[in-house]
Amino acid sequence: MAKRLENKVAVVTGASRGIGRASALALADEGAHVVVAARTADDLDSLAREIETRGVKALPVAGDLSQAADVNRLAEAAEGTFGRVDILVNNAGVGKFGTLAELSVEEYDWMMNANMRATFLCTKAFLPGMLEREEGWVVFVGSVAGLNGLPNETVYCASKHAQYGFARALDHETRPHNVKVTYLAPGGVDTYFAFGTGRTEGDPKLKEYLDSEDVAQALIFAVTQPPKSRVFLIGMRPMREPL
Ligand code: NAP
């Protein structure tokens, strides 16, 4: 039986670990070729080898996606290798928790750049081809912090709300051209996220969180909708987390 994303080409940002890694593997399982991007080249190389065991192609591209030059290099590599990109997963992101008094200007720039600036740069790089071909998917791995104000998360919430506003506005531009936008809003996910910046590796509480694969399956749901349907917002919470 044909796989649902056979011959599609996906770019996943922040794919070196966590939700991005699980998303890249889930897309490969559905038959997509996958371009994987993040800063840690070794992790991308081993992921690319694992993706290729699924019988699809993989392209690892290392770079800091908050930097325009690195995003341009990613776009050139992806389009040079595969000729087009159908699915963009804006997943790369960082977070630090703490009161406003505990957050520095440098930490503000770090979160806004990795979460929003990288989203802006990558979407700007890959959207034109989708609009031209009248087909595409732009998925944002946002957060419940993009929909609600949460304690000790002022700047992280601001960065994720920024992505949400960007996604909502973008949907108006892309829908007439058959390009579907989805904002995923998970609660806690058991990844490396915020280790040393608000979470502690090995904390037993993490085991109650969603797994990266749970979020990856929500992404697959979004990009395998029938032609007339688009799923704009997916809110997900671990069973132990209140709304
Ligand atoms: P993670 O395991 O720490 O992964 C974050 C990924 O982003 C890594 O691959 C990291 O790779 C990459 N990254 C960070 N800054 C980057 C930059 N400037 N350029 C390129 N890549 C960069 O955390 P995760 O939980 O999977 O996070 C993925 C997304 O999910 C984030 O947007 C996060 O906000 C969101 N999210 C997480 C949770 C949670 O509880 N974990 C909940 C809701 C939403 P390198 O370090 O190799 O660059």
Image (tube, rainbow, N blue to C red):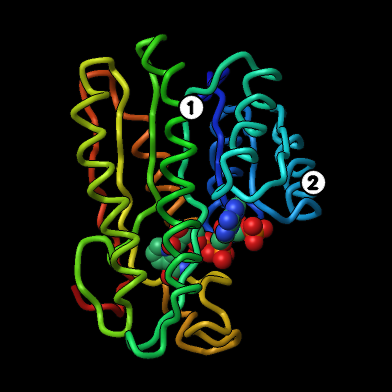
Does dot 2 land on a helix, a strand or a loop? helix
Amino acid beneath label 1:
Phe
On the picture, is 55 further left or further right than 188?
right
Q: Position of residue 117 (x, y in %)?
A: 44, 49
Nearer-the-camera pick, 157 or 42: 157
- In the image, which is nearer the foreground, mark 1 or mark 2? 1
Between residue 14 and residue 202, name the one nearer to us: 14
Residue in view at x 25 percent, y 57 percent: 235
Answer yes or no: is residue 128 visible: yes
Task: Find disc 2 in the rendering and name its residue.
Answer: 45
Q: Say which of 98 and 13 sits in front.
A: 98
Q: Residue furthest front?
A: 105
Q: Is residue 208 left or right of residue 172?
A: right
Which residue is label 1 attached to?
126
For the C terminus, the quadrant is bottom left
| Above or below, 129 relative to 20 | above
Q: Residue at x 42, y 74 (%)?
A: 209
- Label 2: how many Cα within 10 Å (few below 14, some 14–19, many 20+): some
Q: Residue at x 62, y 20 (%)?
A: 79
Identify the residue at horizontal 51%, vertical 76% (top origin).
194
